[in-house]
Image: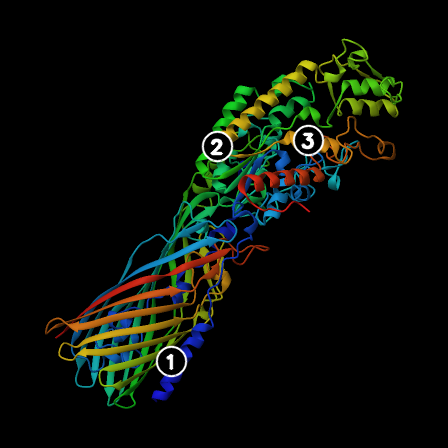
Amino acid sequence: MRRSEVCFALAAALLLARPAVSHAQGYGVYEQGACTMGRGGTAAARPCADASGMYFNPAGIAGLPTSGSLGGTVIMPFTTWSNDNTQIQADFLSKAYPVPNLYFVAPVAKRYALGFGVYVPYGLTTEWDKETFEGRFLGYKTSLKAIYLQPTAAAQFGKFKIGAGLDITHLSVDLERKLDLSQQFAAPGVTFGMLGIPYGTDFADANITGSAWGVGYNLGATFDLTKQVSLGVRYLGRQKVTADGGEAQFTQDPTGLVLTAGNPLGFPAGTPVDALLAPQFETGGSLVTQGVSTSIRLPNQLVMGVAVTPVKALTVMFDAQYTWWEVLDEIPLDFEILPNQSLVLNDNSVWTWRFGAELLLNKEHGTVFRGGFIFHEAAAPDQSVIPNLPEASRNDYSVGFGTRISKTFYIDAAYMLVDAYNRRGRTVALEPGGPITNGLYFNAGANLVSVTLTATF
Amino acid sequence: MFRRFRLIALALPVVAGCYTNETLDPPDLSNNNRLFTRFVAIGTSISAGLQSAGINDSTQRRAFPVLVAEQAGASFSRPSLNLPGCPAPFTNNVTQARVGGATASGCTLRQTPIPYHLGNLAAPGLSTPDLFTNIGSPTSTYERLQIFFLGGQTPWNAVKAAQPTLLSIEIGSNDVLGAVTSAPDPGDPDSVTPYPVFADNYTKFADSVATLNTQVVAFTIPDVTLIPYTSRGSTYWCLKTGACGFPAQFPPTVTVDNNCAPNAAIPGSKGDSVLVPWTIGVAGLLRASSPPFTPFALDCSNTLQVVTPAEYAYVRNTTDQMNQLIRDQAALHGWAVVDVSQILAQLQVQDGGIPAFPSLAAVPTGGSINFGNWFSLDGFHPSSATHRVVADSMIAVVNRFFATEIPAVP
């Protein structure tokens, strides 16, 4: 076999990983305001009065005074991976990721209101050690940001409020991963692994980035059944975001491997494997910087809620949310040079159950204490629980408070513990005859701290 | 309404209760206190599982490290080679026929999917000068096969990457065996790794392993002069002359010089200290015994035919030196040691022992030269039965040294 015959199909190894967007159920950012986060995300029937309602239920801004809210949530995820056979463990890199939000609302006439919000309902970053983590070939860093710009209008007709928002979405994705030489083809039908190259031989660092704009909508309505009981419903439309201008960059990593005499590739003894691979990173090779395009569908959500005020100072709330994650059945990835791929996701549509309560402690200052509990079902099937986002069913526990700090300003703060169930998953690409899962993601979850400052004019 | 809400609230534990924490599915290592969590074997063709001059998944799964790992309940992946092998094992050592009709130079590829964590890092032909480099001895078996077993990694780098909790080190046989099996010059001293070189490499490797925080089981080097690959010159003389208490068996076309006689029969002869490889002596005998009856003359002073007494002494003395170094390093680093000489002693008295001369009984009917129960058809690689004995010896040492309770191979 001559040098020119060493070919790279880069088939499975490059792109078998699923992008992070598919796991927003597990790490979707529903925490778009400290008030709502403190009461477990319950807001469909009675959104918080800080203008963040334009995300949780656009009808909620009707009746609000002119106000603006600026806030942010800091997410500190944690997860440990343990391999079944080797018992080698690895942790998420310990980092904090800020997710900001901004809302402004103004009444128009008596019944109507207009608003504008900027928030990030889908956003995550997972990072593992790029040198040692065994799942680095599926992704050692996955970053997703879906920034929603939402002009909103709402109206109130007695006990009935309706609202609608137009979501202009900027989605950006960054997938960083290593490429494993053992999975590449040295000749048609013959991988380097079949020649003996060990699994986990890093030979390239791949960075796939892309961004695009999409359009969707956010609808909501509330109805005050009685003075004590309110009902609400909110529907977030699905979006299809097509990114044509993505880029895939590849950097060669040294393998340090040296061929011996009589090697099946037919090269002289002492030939460095890296020298054989180098042309793939040069003009004419497969691993030069190239364009990549894809289309991603962001799923639709339906949230139905009820809020009850059994005694004057106490409000309890319940929301049930259904998310059509099944729209993420597969994602195409079309490369300029490398073979096109289609990522099979097969996520399941699932429910989220939210329970919240808010207790008014001081009427004069509007001081309230909040608490909440959330149960999320997992959207990802077993074979899709991977390092990019090791999703699992989870329980969230939240507490929060809010109080007026001046005539103009009101502050909300909240803390949430995300406690994920231990979930079996994998760190290796699916292969015929290989295991669906090869270990356990455990001690998984996140600490979230959120603060929102609201100014009322 | 409040009643409905309470009903919903009560439903919560039911919903949450539908989900449970999934669990790790690790191997059951309860009989070894998790010592075998990441068991790694580095070694020669013996650890790799080569038999009858060939290796494939069928022989690899019979290698003693695999057997030990099975008894320990450990996950232990090997670099499985598709059938017929790389090269394929003999099915007949007289005709040199191999499994599947393969040739000696034929080589199949590794099976897929390739394992994530390779436990058996042994590579045929590995000797101590190869531990830290891939390009030390350009024409060795190791050079030819190492990519299939170590994938271009040096043995040390492969061991380090495997992060062993227990490492078996079976290395040294090829540092001395090459002298015995050298085709152009049996006993060639230049084919023995000079002791200082061996000492430097083994010590460096031991020091490197000491940085890994792993437990170690080291194997001493077998006395390669005891394996049935060779027979003593005196055995040939006795079988030719019938002077040693059993009848003459060689045809007239075979001659054996009196310098092959035992010293007791002809004073001054050194046939007891001369080793004749079967590939020369038995092959010559067979050629002389069947048409066209090519005459074969064995001369125990012919260094191109035999391992001479001086070469024999050099091999044994060097082996002794090397084994002493292995024991010293084991003591220094707190390693367990499997004494291979004890295994050979056991084999010599069990199930027919190690034959002084291979059985040719099956050859006239198209069968193979037989080296007894303990050795495969190449005369120097252990048979599956021996691998079971070696595995049990290692298990006994591990149990004694590490207070484990691993059962013997059934």
Residue appearing at x 79%, y 29% in the figure: B358
Going from the N terminus, do you reach mark 1 or mark 2 first?
1
Q: Position of residue B220 (x, y in %)?
A: 59, 30
Both labels 3 and 1 in a single chain: yes
Q: Can residue A190 be seen here? A: yes
Q: Badge 3 is on which residue? A: B344
Q: Badge 1 is on which residue? A: B9
Q: CA distance from mark 1 to mark 2?
A: 63 Å
Q: Is residue A383 above or below residue A221?
A: above
Residue appearing at x 69%, y 35% in the figure: B382
Both labels 1 and 2 in a single chain: yes
Q: Which chain does tag 1 point to?
A: B
Residues marked 1 and 2 touching at CB (< 8 Å): no
Q: Using the image, tell me which numbered label, if any, was put on residue B333.
A: 2
In the depicted view, which residue is nearer to us: A196 or B245? Answer: B245
Q: Position of residue B399 (x, y in %)?
A: 58, 42
Mark 3, residues whose alpha carbon is within 10 Å: few (<14), some, or many (≥20)? many
Q: Can residue A189 be seen here? A: no
Mark 1, residues whose alpha carbon is within 10 Å: few (<14), some, or many (≥20)? few
In the depicted view, which residue is nearer to us: B343 or B312? Answer: B343
Q: Position of residue A301 (x, y in %)?
A: 38, 74
